[in-house]
Image (spheres, rainbow, N blue to C red):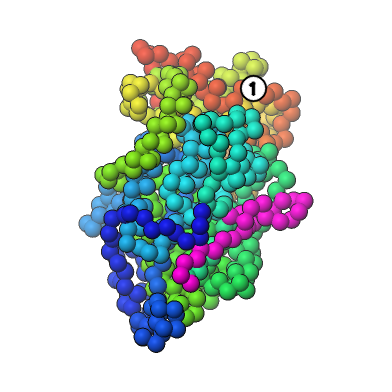
Amino acid sequence: MPATSPASAHQERRRRRTNRFVALTAGVVTVGALAAAALPGSASAGEEHRTGGHGRYQDVQLLSFNDLHGNLEPPAGSSGRVTETQADGTTKTIDAGGVEYLATHLRQARKGEKYSITAAGGDMVGASPLISGLFHDEPTIEALNKLDLDVTSVGNHEFDEGAKELGRLQNGGCHPKDGCYADKKFKGADFPYLAANVLDEKTKKPILKPYWVWKKNGVKVGFIGVTLEGTPDIVSAEGVKGLSFKDETETINKYAKVLQKQGVKSIVALIHEGGFPASTSYNYDCDSPGAGDGVSGPIVDIAKNVTPQVDALVTGHTHSAYVCSIADPAGKPRMVTSAASFGRLYTDTTLTYDRRTGDIARTAVKSANRVVTRDVPKAPDMTELISKWNTLAAPIGNKPIGYISGDIGNTGTESPLGDLIADAQLAHGKQLDPETDLALMNPGGIRAPLTYAAKAGEGDGVVTYAEGFTVQPFANTVNLQDFTGAQVIQALKEQVSGPNAAAPKVLQVSSGLTYTLDLTKSGADRVVTDSIKLNGAAIDPAATYRVATNSFLAGGGDGFPTLGQGTNDVVGSDDLTALEQYLTANSSASNPIAPPKADRITIVK
């Protein structure tokens, strides 16, 4: 894709002035309002002459989003809604998402903007619904090309199928195993994936471009892209084999110096790491009462330490929505944004470029998250794309695999769907070895709820293969391993200690395993040891237990090193097959499965 964004036929939108501040309003953050510093006035005629016939200050529109995860169609359930705070303090939910609508919103936003860039913060692919995941996310790359995406960082999910597959998504070519799906060879992404902190262990060089520069009429904006340093902890070992992941801040600072030496002084960091706002409302003012006070998590320390040479941070990974100003190392406010996930929001940021200095006038930067509502016309080219890939997926995706009597959600410390999946893996384990005792499932591997309402004409309560794929898209296998009771206890304590101390990852447990999680305590003590029981009997530290997990956990993923120490491995079918078999065997149209009660873990708050 050319560095100069093409003009596009989009609706007229409000022009922004650069010689005054805009008042801070709900959902809109203006860095200048916090800096209490004035932007210089409009350029004089002499200044215009010195800048090649252009005014001194040029507004550059930056549209950004993150964590799309191949959600081409509107996501189901709560995954397809956002919460909005009203003027009276009440909240309402709004249906949002779907690339047919995202395309329309982005094209309308670009209307009248001669300087417009569209960027993303990683996880464009991976953990995708069937329409994309079944085809190794080629449909999503095709959609992003049509969206005129200019640049994105990699995220952890870009490595789900390894660096070679990521390279194929960038450069094109047919899948090495499944071949070509359409009548034309897959051409790859028109936009660059940036991976500044992902190095080949042999060459010690980034596996993809570390940075990219957008240029138009003398305006230059550089982009540096990184993913979280902890990617190896949340991706299968095979996916990150031969790669090393470096510190995000150090890497950004390194390449900011490189760009400065090249004369690029306006810099945006695309960071696939994020924070947690104090409110779930997309229009929450996280700068009240003070700059950045309303957001916590890893992005705060990153933002405070990234060089002041970087003018804005587009972030992701946590699937949260926020527009915050966080002070840089020089104490000056800097915009930090995230647009939730699944294409439900996009962030609209104005970067005011100073042609005299080549830098961004940061006191004038303003930003707001916008909802991808479904009350706009669908983009016909996206409708055609979805129809094409759905036609190819339909013979597999429309197959019924089970029946449910109500929504089975995937949210909460212990979720009904987590219980169901753990039970399915226990049942699959018992098929492999009748001595299987229990199953443990990582919550991050459950990507969507099962909804009762018909989604594509299959009928209420019918679970299709496509819906099951959306829930478990990773193709992890179900693995059996032997653990001592002491190791089982230790694994449960690792949910709330070590790497998981600050942000617990509570495993979903199969029927029969019960224990108390006391959140009033700290660290590993939050798991009450003498409460851990299997079928009513206390776990014996010296006994051996046969445990089913997915292959990701069996490799020690998600901060569970003890689960990587099992013995007597047996590898079963993939986890989706286990779920399919369980639903088919235990439900029918006349006798559907009811949502589990999610009462296996007693939570004390």
The foreground one among 58 and 180 is 180
Side of 348 relative to 205 (left or right): left
The quarter of the rendered structure image containing the C terminus is: top left
Q: Residue at x 68, y 38 (%)?
A: 238
Q: Which residue is mark 1?
A: 572
Question: Is residue 205 located in the magenta-colored stretch of the structure?
Answer: yes
Give the camera-side residue of 136 and 551.
136
Quadrant of residue 32 in the image?
bottom left
Please report the residue visible at 60 percent of the width from the left and 64 percent of the height from the top. Answer: 252
Residue 494, picture quadrant: top right
Residue at far right of view: 202
**Secondary structure state at the residue bearing disc 1:** strand
Front residue of 599/188: it is 188
158 drawn magenta: no
Q: Nearer the viewer, residue 114 or 254?
A: 114
Q: Residue furthest bottom?
A: 46
Classify 361 as above or below 340.
below
Number of labelled discs? 1
**Relative height, residue 131 to residue 45 (above, below):** above
**Visible residue check, residue 128:** no
- What secondary structure is the stretch in magenta mostly built from? loop
Which residue appears at 60% of the width and 30% of the height?
179
Residue 124 place in picture, x, y as percent: 50, 45
Within-10-Å neighbours for mark 1: few <14, some 14–19, many 20+: many
Residue 388, position as x, y percentages in the image: 42, 31
Q: Is residue 538 above or below residue 108?
A: above
Point out the stretch of residues depicted in magenta.
194-218
- Residue 527 locus on image (x, y percent): 57, 40
Residue type at tag 1: Gly
**584 left or right of 436?**
left
Residue at the spot 76% in from the left edge and 54% down from the top edge: 203
